[in-house]
Image: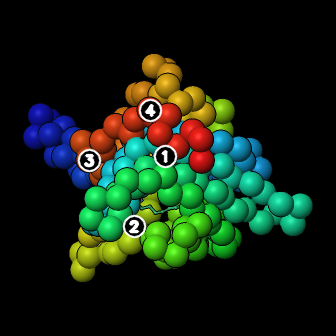
Amino acid sequence: MLRICVALFVLATCWAQDCQVANIPVMQNFDKSRFAGKWYAVAKKDPVGLFLLDNVAATYVIDESGKMTANAYGRVIILNNWEMCANMFATFEDTPDPAKFKMTYWGAASYLQSGNDEHWVIDTDYDNYAIHYSCREVDMDGTCLDGYSFIFSRHPTGLRPEDQKIVTDKKKEICLLGKYRRVSHTGFCESS
Ligand code: DAO
């Protein structure tokens, strides 16, 4: 009996820890109009060649046709040692899954990063926290080789204590527990 229980536990753990990008669970019935507005990044899992360092916030807008766009800012260091606040823009293409978007992003200045990334919403309660995920490169075994993720809060001071467990459980589910660093808000980008 004990052996069966252990086997079931191991099976359940493996199932809960499915790190295949294709199996990452995203927000069910995601409603982008409720997602609109300003979000402060409070933690980030960096991609290879990280870009946005801290003081990161994104404001999502949904126009009358339902199209989502965003403008974002964050402190970056470019050209070896030039510290500045980067203003970024993004457009989103809908996909059959309402929580998964194809994002095109670019900087207000040409020397800032630009590119195309996945933009998935893993979970949100719309009013307090949101978990974003983007895998840039899928490995041969189906897991993510290079990606990034933001933990967003509606509050620049961070997550409410009651949201912390939910977010920790989701980090585990997407195989990124322990991979995040704190994103501070010092006012660096406030005047831009
Ligand atoms: O910081 O290393 C990095 C990658 C960031 C990609 C730039 C994204 C700009 C638009 C952000 C919209 C919300 C995620």
Residue type indicated by callout 4? Thr
Q: Residue at x 78, y 57 (%)?
A: 62
Give the residue pinned by disc 1.
Answer: 56
Q: Quadrant of the N terminus?
A: top left
Q: Residue at x 40, y 35 (%)?
A: 184
What element does badge 2 sit on?
Answer: strand
Any part of residue 60 in sight: yes
Asked if the residue at label 2 sits under 8 Å from ligand 1, the reply is no
Asked if the residue at label 1 sits under 8 Å from ligand 1, the reply is yes
Residue type indicated by callout 3? Lys
54 sits left or right of 127 in the view: left
Residue toward you, 109 or 2 = 109
Give the mark, 4 or 2, whose residue is nearer the N terminus.
2
What element does badge 3 sit on?
Answer: loop
On residue 179, the disc is 3
Disc 3 residue crowd, few under 14, some 14–19, many 20+, Cα 10 Å: few
Q: Position of residue 189 (x, y in %)?
A: 52, 43
Give the mark, 1 or 3, whose residue is nearer the N terminus.
1
Disc 2 residue crowd, few under 14, some 14–19, many 20+, Cα 10 Å: some
Extreme-left residue of the structure: 3
Give the residue pinned by disc 2.
Answer: 135
Give the residue pinned by disc 4.
Answer: 186
Q: CA distance from mark 3 to mark 4?
A: 22 Å
- Foreground mark, 1 or 4, reads 4
Extreme-bottom residue of the structure: 140
